[in-house]
Image (cartoon, rainbow, N blue to C red):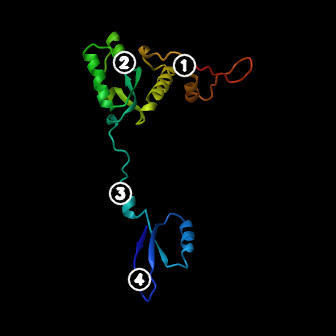
């Protein structure tokens, strides 16, 4: 940012530019202006007051975020994976309303109602697995987490993922790749 400061000693007008000192390269830039009427001043972006100031990362409470979440059955400790573009607290309240009204709108509610299992509070049973703001990525990430938790044997039966997605399998376990036994090459079948 150039800040004009008219210094008229005789008939020379000097202009000042302020740069943030980031590395020794800045000194090389100042040499370019050595024989001009532009003078360079430096400022620091790591003063003591700036270093002492607490960093404000995203302070949004977890349950006010959207994304991929997990609900855990309090009885069997098995998981249900869901996605929401709204905040988690609102989605949790919907699941609880479905249970109270005996309305099996999700695999988690079906599991609780059919098996007469216990469910808990928001803090005890809901976990944010992946915060997402991009709604187009909700379903792919949900499917990835469903497959991953199913492979670990911790997914409720009501949410069986079907056939494993081989691309997700490569993400979950990169050391295990499906090979064609006759040719030894990688074979992926995409269902369209």
Residue sticking out furthest to the right: 183
Q: Are marks 4 and 1 in contact (CB under 8 Å)?
A: no
Q: Which mark is residue 53?
A: 3
Badge nearest the viewer, 3 or 1: 1
Neighbours of disc 2 within 10 Å: few (<14), some (14-19), many (20+): many
**Badge 2 is on which residue?**
108
Q: Earlier in the sequence, mark 3 or mark 1?
A: 3
Distance between the alpha carbons at the discs numbered 4 and 1: 74 Å
- Asked which secondary structure carries label 4, the reply is loop
Distance between the alpha carbons at the discs numbered 4 and 3: 36 Å
**Badge 1 is on which residue?**
164
Q: Which of marks 4 and 1 is nearer the N terminus?
A: 4
Q: Are marks 3 and 2 in contact (CB under 8 Å)?
A: no
- Asked which secondary structure carries label 3, the reply is loop
Q: Which of marks 2 and 4 is nearer the N terminus?
A: 4
Badge nearest the viewer, 4 or 3: 4
Q: In the rendered view, would you say 98 is above or below 129?
A: above
Neighbours of disc 3 within 10 Å: few (<14), some (14-19), many (20+): few
Badge nearest the viewer, 2 or 4: 4
Distance between the alpha carbons at the discs numbered 1 and 2: 21 Å
Distance between the alpha carbons at the discs numbered 3 and 1: 48 Å
**Badge 4 is on which residue?**
7
Where does residue 143 sit, x and y in percent of width and height?
A: 48, 24
Q: Earlier in the sequence, mark 4 or mark 3?
A: 4
Is 179 on the left-hand or right-hand side of 3? right
Rendered-image quadrant of the N terminus: bottom left
Q: Do the residues labelled 3 and 1 touch (CB within 8 Å)?
A: no
């Amino acid at each position: 940012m150039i800040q004009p400061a008219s210094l008229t000693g005789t008939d020379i007008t000097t202009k000042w530019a302020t740069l943030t000192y980031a590395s020794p390269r800045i000194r090389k830039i100042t040499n370019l202006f050595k024989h001009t009427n532009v003078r360079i001043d430096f400022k620091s972006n790591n003063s003591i007051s700036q270093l002492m100031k607490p960093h404000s990362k995203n302070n949004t409470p977890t349950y006010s975020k959207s994304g991929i979440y997990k609900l855990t059955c309090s009885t069997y400790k098995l998981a249900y994976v869901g996605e929401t573009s709204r905040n988690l607290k609102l989605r949790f309240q919907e699941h609880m309303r479905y249970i109270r009204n005996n309305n099996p709108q999700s695999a988690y509610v079906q599991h609780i109602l059919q098996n007469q299992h216990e469910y808990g509070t928001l803090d005890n049973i809901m976990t944010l697995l992946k915060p997402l703001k991009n709604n187009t990525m909700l379903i792919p990430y949900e499917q990835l987490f469903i497959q991953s938790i199913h492979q670990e044997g911790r997914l409720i039966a009501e949410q069986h993922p079907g056939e494993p997605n081989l691309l997700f399998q490569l993400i979950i376990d990169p050391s295990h790749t499906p090979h064609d036994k006759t040719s030894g090459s990688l074979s992926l079948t995409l269902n369209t």
